[in-house]
Every structure is written in C-alpha cells, then in structure tokens.
C-alpha cells in the first residue's frame, strides 16, 4: 500500500469534517495516511488548548 503524507491543514480539515476537505479524499483513498512529527505536535497542542479552554 502506498503512503500519503498529510499536511497539518489537511488533517485539520478532515478532522473537523469541513466540506473543503472533500477535495483531498481522492488523493488519499486507498493509501496509508501518515503525518509528520510536527503535525502530531501541533494536533496535540490544539487538543490540549481545547481541553484547557473547557475547564
């Protein structure tokens, strides 16, 4: 299976189910999506900030 490296913005759009994300789906269909360590760090930071704002 081939891989597709996803940009942070693309991951964010997909995660939030924005309609703009639909344009990327054909490019990642039947591929293994992977993210960089920096994207992971940004997503973890975003999640922590969201959790903190709800407290």
Image (tube, grey):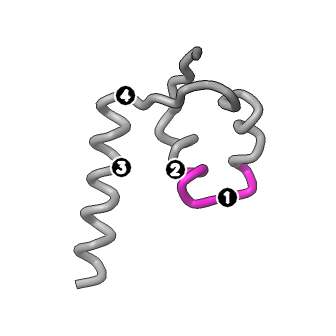
Query: CA gap, disc 1 to disc 3?
Result: 16 Å
User: Is mark 4 in CB contact (under 8 Å) with mark 3?
Assistant: no
User: Is mark 1 in CB contact (under 8 Å) with mark 3?
Assistant: no
Q: Is mark 1 on a helix, strand or loop?
A: loop
- List x then y, in percent, for residue 22: 75, 46
**Residue at the outermost bottom position:** 55
Quadrant position of the C terminus in the picture: bottom left
- List x then y, in percent, for residue 53: 28, 78
Q: Name the residue under label 3.
A: 43
Q: What element carries label 3?
A: helix
**First of labels 3, 2 by sequence position:** 2
Q: Mark 2 points at which residue?
A: 12
User: Is mark 4 in CB contact (under 8 Å) with mark 2?
Assistant: no
User: Is mark 4 in CB contact (under 8 Å) with mark 1?
Assistant: no
Front one among 33 and 45: 33
Query: CA gap, disc 3 to disc 2?
Result: 8 Å
Query: CA gap, disc 4 to disc 1?
Result: 21 Å
**Left of 45 or right of it: where is 8?**
right
**Rendered residue at 76%/32% (across/down):** 26
Query: CA gap, disc 4 to disc 3?
Result: 11 Å
Query: CA gap, disc 2 to disc 1?
Result: 9 Å
**First of labels 2, 1 by sequence position:** 2
Q: Name the residue under label 1.
A: 18
Name which quarter of the figure residue 30 lies in. top right
Q: Name the residue under label 4.
A: 36
- List x then y, in percent, for residue 14: 60, 50
Which residues fall within the magenta stretch? 12-20
**First of labels 4, 2 by sequence position:** 2
**Rendered residue at 33%/40% (across/down):** 40
């Amino acid at each position: 299976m081939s891989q597709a490296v996803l940009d942070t913005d693309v991951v964010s759009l997909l995660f939030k189910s924005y309609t703009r994300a639909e344009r990327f789906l054909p490019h990642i269909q039947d591929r293994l999506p992977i993210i960089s360590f920096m994207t992971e760090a940004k997503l973890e930071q975003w999640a922590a900030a969201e959790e903190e704002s709800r407290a």
